[in-house]
Image: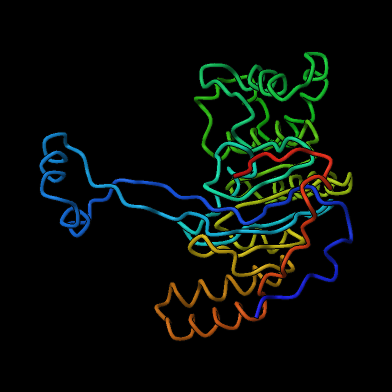
Amino acid sequence: MAPSADPGSMASDPTVVVQNVRVRYRVPSTDIADLRAVSRSERLYLHATGQRPKVTVDALKGVSFVARAGESIGILGRNGSGKSTLLRIIAGLETPLSGSVVARSNPVLLGVDAALVPELPGERNVLLGCLAMGLTRAQARAVLPEIVELAGIGKAIYRPMKTYSSGMASRLRFAIAAAVNPDILLIDEALGTGDAAFKERSERKMNQLRAAAGTVFIVSHAAQVIEEMCSRAIWMMDGVLIGDGPGPEIAHDYRWWSWNVAKDEFDKADEILANCREKWAPYAPVIAEPGTYASPQRHAR
């Protein structure tokens, strides 16, 4: 039976509407069975050219949901579940095989919109990143102190980016993206790289964005980040959205399931997963006709 419509689904304005999105890739495979599955002539061609046979991977399989103003949405799932692909589709960096995405404004994907140059100092990169996201030079200089404080990298802001650790670079990218106060902010694996002080500052900044009726998406392998920072979470598995609900509760269940998988307690993990699929089964989103929304569709097939 299809899940019923979410009774609270019209509580606030939609910011992102994802409808039946499917993504399919053709990727090389080293599996000998895939090589044997192709014709003899194709095997000879692949051998002569040093290529591998390609297989079809369905990265997203009909994902639908509505994100609303004031939400911080965590996206959970193991490697290969479709988390980052979903974020890139929302950002407009990839086009789905089918389905549509509607956003009321241009989403900012952390680490992509900020055009950072390794040879330049952090200070110059801040200016470049802000200019790339639409600020004037005067506005960029005005927010520089705020960005340095949020990133927490101190005097390193005057050193070349190539001397930064991966954590320092991630924190600076987050600070640049957040400083322009985007309506829709997409964060992929960037908030698990700091200390407790950075976590507190970044959480405070995300709360400010949400209070201004914005929406924040966070992809993280660290379920504790989702548990502590997100009002809502969606659980992805093999390209399918299997759970949607309160962030702290879903993240807690995800952590318990993951722990049992890591301990090879597969029967217990299967039991937890079955319960979670039932408890957090996604509501059928209330999706109006495309003309209802002020913004045009970002993708449509």
> What is the x, y in percent for residue 194?
62, 46
> What is the x, y in percent for residue 8?
85, 67
Total number of numbered labels? Answer: 0
Locate the N terminus and report the quarter of the image it occupies. Answer: bottom right
Q: Is residue 36 left or right of residue 297?
A: left
Residue occupying the point 71% across, 40% down: 297
Residue occupying the point 57% across, 36% down: 93
Picture layout, residue 174 above or below residue 196: above
Colour option used: rainbow
> What is the x, y in percent for residue 216?
74, 48
Q: Nearer the viewer, residue 103 or 37?
A: 37
> Would you identify the image quadrant in which residue 181 lies?
top right
Residue occupying the point 79% across, 47% down: 15
Q: Nearer the viewer, residue 235 or 48?
A: 48
> What is the x, y in percent for residue 48?
11, 35
> Would you identify the image quadrant in which residue 246 lies?
bottom right
Picture layout, residue 126 above or below residue 293: above
Locate the C terminus and report the quarter of the image it occupies. Answer: top right
Picture layout, residue 84 above or below residue 74: above
